[in-house]
Image (spheres, helix red, strand yellow):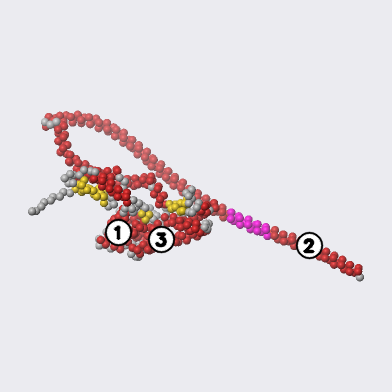
Amino acid sequence: MEYTIIISALTLVVGMIISYILWNMLLARRKKMIIQDAESEAEVIKKEKILQAKERFLQLKTEHDRVITEKNSRMALAENKFKQRETETSKKFEEVQRKQKELDIIKDNLTSQLEIVDKKSDELEKMHKMHVEKLEFLSGLSAEDAKNQLIDSLKAEARTAAMSSINEIMDEAKLTANKEAKRVIVQTIQRVATETAIENSVTVFHIDSDEIKGRIIGREGRNIRALEAATGVEIIVDDTPEAIILSAFDPVRREIARLALHQLVTDGRIHPARIEEVVLKVQKQIEEEIIEVGKRTSIDLGIHGLHPELIRLIGKMKYRSSYGQNLLQHSREVANLCAIMATELGLNAKTAKRAGLLHDIGKVPDDEPELPHAILGMKIAERCKEKPDVCNAIGSHHDETEMTTLFAPIVQVCDAISGARPGARREVVESYIKRLKEMEDMAYSYPGVLKTFAIQAGRELRVIVGSEKISDEEAAKLSFDIAKKIQDEMTYPGQVKITVIRETRAISYAK
């Protein structure tokens, strides 16, 4: 019995040992299968990641190739322009050399002719002496006495002839003045317009700390590139403390960039996707504000029935300045002045006000063709079905086209009044008054002047002279002398008209 129990126990132990060994073998096989599955799955994942990396690399390479191609095309275009300019310069240089050769030939001819003239002048001088001696013998007067009598008799005639010649020369100069004025203006712009261009094309965005500059630039400059691409504005981040410069000629784009930067800095989330979202949102806000400003302006002035494009252009005037004067404010002033003047003249005040408001819309188009702003504004008004009277007033307010209605000179005059108003275009009142006083004092310094009046915002000087002290010929000479002195010694915008008034009064009393 005991042997049976021992055998059973041994059998049970052996069975358990065999079961344990089989279980371990099964576990080892299971573990090996799990490891093999994991390795195969890891290999699949590895292959997928490699494929994804290759696709990303190909995308980046394609983008890089596209950017390189665009840069190469821009460089080729710039190189072509440079070659064209070089060709034009070479042609101009050859033309100058050819003209120089012609001038040398003409100079040689003139030299030979001058020698002949000198010989003939010697002969004429000898003959002149002979004739003078004969005349002195016949008249009984010396040459000096005859000369003095001739000078006295012809002095007044010579003065009149001289003034008429001066007037003829000035009239002739006016005919060729436009070409010379353009040349002078272009040279002046090249030399001194830099500060004005910077002042009208730059907006300074203030920040709390310079730490924000790094966030705006982003990793490897991706944020600032995204912002410049979305707004079309060049963003300058330099050593200026707590300031970023936004540079663009379009004031609307600068305003969009400023507002977008403000929202991004305030929100704190600055990355390319967020930048595009904010810029689109701000663009929509600005567009809505432009239309709202245009509508509000037309309603305030009582102008109805404007084309939507004209309303939008009027709203854009808010972001444009002309000679430092806000264009929308200037147009509103001109519209109100036109209405008052038209009412006084018995014309339609609404039409005059409409022409005054729209006279400068050619300064704010979406596209900018190479046309004067008055002509461009007239074409826009014609496209928007405005009346011919309004279109002509817009196109002729700078004399680009002929005036056909009375509204045209009204708009021209009111435009000049708004621009010439003291302080309208960055001229300090004190300097304005000082300039007028200097102009009047300068005219007072001449003998015979009784009164002087600087009128039309300093664009005309009227000088009243005494009739017993100055003759008509001397009055013309005085006007010329004052104009020349003002031109040489004073600085002023535009031109100054000098009017000398001489009157004779005959007074009698009936007793």
User: In this rendering, which labeled residue sits more in front, label 2 or label 1?
Assistant: 1
Horizontal side of 20 relative to 337 (left or right) equals right
Q: Where is residue 199 in the image (x, y as percent from the top left)?
A: 40, 50
Element under label 3? helix
| Front one among 407 and 19 | 19
Q: How far apart are marks 1 and 3 (CA)?
A: 24 Å
Residue 355 in the image, given as x and y percentages of width and height: 32, 60
Q: What residue type is labelled 3?
A: Ile
Q: Please state the extent of the stretch shown in magenta in the rendering.
A: 41-57
Within the magenta stretch, is there residue 44? Answer: yes
Residue at mark 3: 290
Task: Sort mark 2 into few (<14), some (14-19) or many (20+) by Cα contacts within 10 Å.
Answer: few
The crowding category of the residue bearing disc 3, from other C-alpha atoms within 10 Å (few below 14, some 14 to 19, many at least 20), is many
Write down the residue under mark 1. Answer: 337
Residues marked 2 and 1 touching at CB (< 8 Å)? no
- Residue at label 2? 24
Residue 295 colored in magenta in the image: no
Taking the image as shown, residue 252 lies to the left or right of residue 508, namely right
Q: Earlier in the sequence, mark 1 or mark 3?
A: 3
Question: Which amino acid lies under the numbered mark 1 shown in the image of this protein?
Answer: Leu
Q: Is residue 351 left or right of residue 206?
A: left
